Structure formats: structure tokens, C-alpha cells
Amino acid sequence: MKNILLVYASMTGNTEVIAEIIEEAIKEEGIEVTVRESLRANPKEMLKYDGIILGSYTYEGGVIADEFMIFYEEMDAYDLSGKTAAVFGSGDSFYEKTFCAAVDLISEKLTDIGANVVLDGLKIDLMPEDGEEERCRQFGKDFAKIMLETTNR
């Protein structure tokens, strides 16, 4: 059975809510998910999982969350070739030019260390509301379906 590690950083709770919605959607598809806050996660854990989902809010000028930075920097020590990955995050559209820049930075890092990033990064303005909750749910379902397809090949 496929398994997924979901690691996130959340300061105001926005990214945590997104993570919870994604987790629920993946579990509905019958896949096991382990969820960790980034400060309680070790990048080496990624090697034990088939799928990796990472999430961080973007701080003001396009910076990855401080809470996620140690995890992010230590990722370089691991080869994630063969791992399926995706990235999500929250940001503030007030910062138009750097809105959810952390999502792009983390996606690039995953690609650089060999992971196959299979979905466009999910970018949510602050707290998921209205249709954005469904976007989060669909992101989780889409990732789960990709994981299941790779099992059936």
C-alpha cells in the first residue's frame, strides 16, 4: 500500500487548515497519510514514503516560513529520485509579486533533489474559503489518484 508524508508550516493556522483538508481527501481515497509540522519533522523521513506533500506559508516579501527553513535547507542531503511530490501553501495576495512564492521555491527544491512534482502548486490566499476548500480537497484527491495509478502500473 502506498503511503504519503505531509509536512507543513503554519503560523496563523491557514496552512494547517489546508493540510487538514488535503489529508482528509487523501484518506478518503484509501491512502495512508502521516502528517507532521515542519519543526517536528526530519527530511530523512521522506525516504520512507512513496509520496511527499510539503506546505508552507509565504512570509511578506516572498520568504519561506522560518519554521520550514531548517527542513528546507536539510532536504539537500537526500536523493528523492522515484518519489512523487506536490506542494501547497498560503499567502497574502496583498504581496502581489511574491504571492505564495514559497510554493515555487519548495517545488524547485524537490525537483532539484530528484522528486517528481506531479501537480501545479496549490496557492491559497490566506484561509481557504468558499470554492478554495474544494480546490484543496481536489488537490488531495488528484495526488491520491496519481499515487494509486503508479501502484497499478
Image: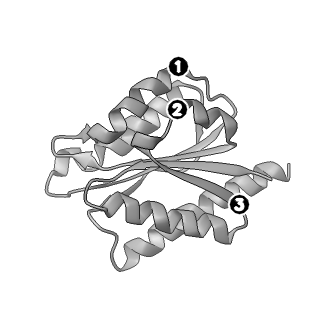
The Cα–Cα distance between marks 3 and 1, rounded to whole angstroms, is 27 Å
Precedes in sequence: disc 3 or disc 2: 3
Precedes in sequence: disc 2 or disc 1: 2
Q: Answer yes or no: do the residues labelled 2 and 1 have beta carbons within 8 Å?
A: yes
Q: What residue is shown at x 45% (from left), y 25% (from top)?
A: 74
Residue behind mark 3? 31
The Cα–Cα distance between marks 3 and 2, rounded to whole angstroms, is 21 Å
Q: What residue is shown at x 39% (from left), y 66% (from top)?
A: 17
Q: Which residue lies most toward the bottom here?
A: 130
Secondary structure, mark 1, is helix
Amino acid on which the number 3 mark rests in the picture:
Ile
The Cα–Cα distance between marks 2 and 1, rounded to whole angstroms, is 9 Å
Compared to residue 73, the image places residue 142 above or below, namely: below
Q: What residue is shown at x 31% (from left), y 50% (from top)?
A: 57
Residue behind mark 2? 43
Query: Label 2 crowding class (10 Å Cα cut-off): few <14, some 14-19, many 20+?
Result: some
Amino acid on which the number 2 mark rests in the picture:
Pro
